[in-house]
Image (spheres, rainbow, N blue to C red):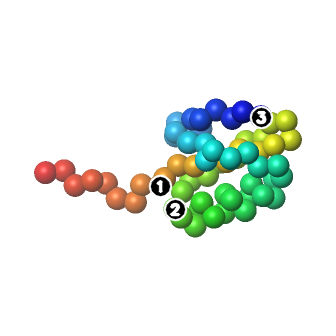
């Protein structure tokens, strides 16, 4: 499995975290740790392996002067 670096889902851009996981459970643990760090997360499966994609959640808009 060679995941793509960028994935778009629901009009949002997600970046691959650079690792391939061999089990769904392992990928779920990683997803949860990213969520605790305020990332949006999605996971894909191919050939029995898993890739985790993340997107930083914007917390505040930049001030316009």
Return the disc, 1 or 2, that comes first in the chain's sequence.
Answer: 2
Residue 39 rendering spot, x and y as whole percentages: 54, 57
Report whether 30 appears left or right of 8.
right
Tell me whether the residue at label 1 lies in contact with that at label 2, contact meaning CB atoms closer than 8 angstroms.
Answer: yes
Element under label 2?
Answer: loop
- Mark 2 vs mark 3, CA separation in Å: 27 Å
- Farthest residue, direction bottom: 36
Return the disc, 2 or 3, that comes first in the chain's sequence.
Answer: 3
Task: Note whether residue 63 is visible.
Answer: yes
Residue 12 rendering spot, x and y as whole percentages: 52, 40
Q: Which mark is residue 11?
A: none
Residue underneath mark 1: 57
Report whether 54 appears left or right of 24.
left
- Mark 1 vs mark 2, CA separation in Å: 6 Å
Residue at x 47%, y 55% (from the top left corner) = 57
Element under label 1?
Answer: loop
Tell me whether the residue at label 3 lies in contact with that at label 1, contact meaning CB atoms closer than 8 angstroms.
Answer: no
Q: Quadrant of residue 48?
A: top right
Residue underneath mark 3: 1
Q: Pick the quarter of the image with the N terminus.
A: top right
Judge depth for marks 3 and 1 and give the one in front: 3
């Amino acid at each position: 499995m060679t995941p793509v670096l960028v994935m778009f889902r629901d009009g949002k851009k997600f970046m691959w975290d650079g690792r391939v996981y061999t089990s769904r459970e392992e990928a779920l643990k990683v997803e949860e740790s990213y969520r605790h760090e305020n990332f949006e997360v999605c996971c894909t499966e191919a050939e029995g392996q898993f890739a985790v994609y993340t997107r930083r959640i914007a917390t505040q808009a930049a001030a316009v002067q």
